[in-house]
Image: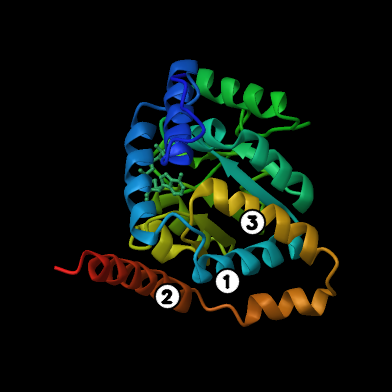
């Protein structure tokens, strides 16, 4: 990894980039994962590289849904394993959720390396190596485990492609997406769309998980029933507009 000085104004962003590049070198992340990261970075610029109000609103509802779930599962791909293996394991612990590796560019080697990476970060069990069920999809994301994603009632899908998200929703599951692009098919299809950077979203969700665990069940139900995903997405787009307007005003041309 290139050493990034801590006082560099773009420290966080450059570290994330280094992590994804290292993931590719280790064989964890697909080469296409670099493109996905670049796309995410540009949307993060647009939203102002912060967790917006609408993101926090979605994160609260997502945590409530995961806490109330019977079989919550967190789907892990090559970008997630490179960027935040420790955070994703911590979130699974707080939520009592299973972890399952599910890849678009699937190879058995990548699945094994990602499982090893999650275990090195404290996971006791990681599903995904022995898929015994299939989703109705024509690509490798169809390969799932029956006690994991297949039977899950709530699935967290960070950095997803729209196809599987749609299928999981069709199957009656609550699907929580983390995607910086509010216009993506995933964001528009998920039950709860978190428009935030993966690392910020996971930090917020871990904190909220600890907090909301102390709430009564009725409070959690209320957070879910009052949540409106169209409103969250519309606000996310407006937040981008406002951020751009503020920057234009600063430039004062
Ligand atoms: O590891 P694999 O084989 O399963 O492949 C994973 C990738 C991510 C390569 C694959 O799912 C893919 O191609 O995804 P897409 O279609 O590029 O979608 C990724 C979405 O995640 C895009 O909308 C990006 O804006 C968004 N994104 C990228 N980086 C981040 C992000 N969202 C939140 N945090 C990020 N760090």
| Nearer the observer, 189 or 230 | 230
Q: CA distance from mark 2 to mark 1?
A: 10 Å
Query: Does residue 147 appear in the picture of this structure?
Result: no
Q: CA distance from mark 3 to mark 2?
A: 19 Å
Is residue 242 depicted above or below 98 in this figure? below
The dot on residue 235 is 2
Report the residue at 46% width, 79% height from top: 231
How far from the left and from the top, in percent, is residue 244? 29, 66
Report the residue at 58% width, 20% height from top: 113
| Nearer the observer, 224 or 59 | 59
Residues marked 2 and 1 touching at CB (< 8 Å): yes
Q: How many marks?
A: 3
Report the residue at 41% width, 40% height from top: 10
| Nearer the observer, 218 or 84 | 84
How far from the left and from the top, in percent, is residue 194? 51, 61
| Nearer the observer, 192 or 86 | 86
Report the residue at 56% width, 33% height from top: 81
Q: Which residue is mark 3?
A: 204
The reply, left or right, for residue 249 in relation to residue 208 is left
Q: For numbered disc 3, what is the local secondary structure?
A: helix
Answer yes or no: disc 3 within 8 Å of ligand 1.
no
The dot on residue 57 is 1
How far from the left and from the top, in percent, is residue 6? 52, 33
Residues marked 3 and 1 touching at CB (< 8 Å): no
Q: CA distance from mark 3 to mark 1?
A: 11 Å
Is residue 5 depicted above or below 244 in this figure? above
Q: Which numbered disc flags the more N-terminal residue, 3 or 1?
A: 1
Q: Which numbered disc flags the more N-terminal residue, 3 or 2?
A: 3
Q: For numbered disc 2, what is the local secondary structure?
A: helix
């Amino acid at each position: 990894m290139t050493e990034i000085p801590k006082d560099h104004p773009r420290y966080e962003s450059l570290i994330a980039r280094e992590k994804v590049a290292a993931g590719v070198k280790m064989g964890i992340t697909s080469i296409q994962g670099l493109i996905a990261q670049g796309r995410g970075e540009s949307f993060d610029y647009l939203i102002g590289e912060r967790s917006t109000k609408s993101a926090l609103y979605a994160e609260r509802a997502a945590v409530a849904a995961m806490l109330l779930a019977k079989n919550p599962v967190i789907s892990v791909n090559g970008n997630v394993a490179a960027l935040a293996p420790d955070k994703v394991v911590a979130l699974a612990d707080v939520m009592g959720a299973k972890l399952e590796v599910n890849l678009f560019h699937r190879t058995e080697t990548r699945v094994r390396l990602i499982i090893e990476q999650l275990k090195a970060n404290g996971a006791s069990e990681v599903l995904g190596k022995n898929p015994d069920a299939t989703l109705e999809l024509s690509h490798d994301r169809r390969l799932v485990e029956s006690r994991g994603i297949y039977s899950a009632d709530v699935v967290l899908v960070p950095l997803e492609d729209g196809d599987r998200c749609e299928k999981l929703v069709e199957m009656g599951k609550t699907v929580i997406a983390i995607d910086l692009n509010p216009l993506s098919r995933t964001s528009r299809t998920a039950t709860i769309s978190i428009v935030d950077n993966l690392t910020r979203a996971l930090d917020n969700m871990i904190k909220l998980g600890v907090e909301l665990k102390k709430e009564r069940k009725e409070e959690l139900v209320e957070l879910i029933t009052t949540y409106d995903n169209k409103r969250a997405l519309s606000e996310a787009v407006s937040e981008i507009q406002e951020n751009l307007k503020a920057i234009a005003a600063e430039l004062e041309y």
